[in-house]
């Protein structure tokens, strides 16, 4: 079993509200939303580091995701 590490983080009100909104919208715990966000951030970071782009969009319009 994976060892659990407890963290204490500080979020501004807007970020905390978005975390809560995502949690409720998908029926997930706050912890699971954070886990998924970190996994997604890691995936995008690895793709960009490998020289690839990550895009989203429709058939008519594409947008590139950029990590700041």
Image (cartoon, helix red, strand yellow):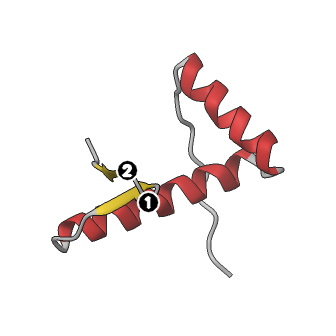
Secondary structure under the numbered disc 1 in the rendered image: loop
Q: How many marks?
A: 2
The residue wearing badge 1 is 59
Q: Position of residue 7 (x, y in %)?
A: 56, 45
Q: Position of residue 68 (x, y in %)?
A: 25, 41
Placement of 53 over or under 11, stated as above or below: below
Residue 9, numbered circle? none
At 52% across and 28% down in the image, what residue appears? 10
With 19 as the anchor, is 46 left or right in this view? left
Find the distance from the CA under tag 1 to the CA under tag 2.
Answer: 6 Å
Furthest residue in direction front, as rendered: 60
Q: Position of residue 24 (x, y in %)?
A: 81, 40
Furthest residue in direction left, as rendered: 51
Circle 2 crowding by C-alpha within 10 Å: few under 14, some 14–19, many from 20:
few
The residue wearing badge 2 is 61
| Tags 1 and 2 touching, CB below 8 Å | no
Q: Position of residue 50 (x, y in %)?
A: 19, 74
Task: Please identify the quarter of the rendering in which residue 13 is found.
Answer: top right
Placement of 36 over or under 9, stated as above or below: below
In this view, the residue in front, 32 or 1, is 32
In this view, the residue in front, 13 or 8, is 13
At 19% across and 67% down in the image, what residue appears? 49
Furthest residue in direction bottom, as rendered: 1
């Amino acid at each position: 079993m994976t060892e659990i590490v407890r963290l204490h983080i500080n979020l501004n009100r807007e970020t905390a509200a978005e975390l809560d909104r995502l949690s409720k919208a998908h029926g997930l715990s706050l912890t699971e939303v954070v886990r998924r966000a970190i996994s997604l951030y890691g995936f995008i970071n690895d793709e960009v580091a490998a020289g690839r782009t990550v895009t989203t969009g429709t058939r008519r319009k594409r947008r590139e995701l950029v990590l700041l």
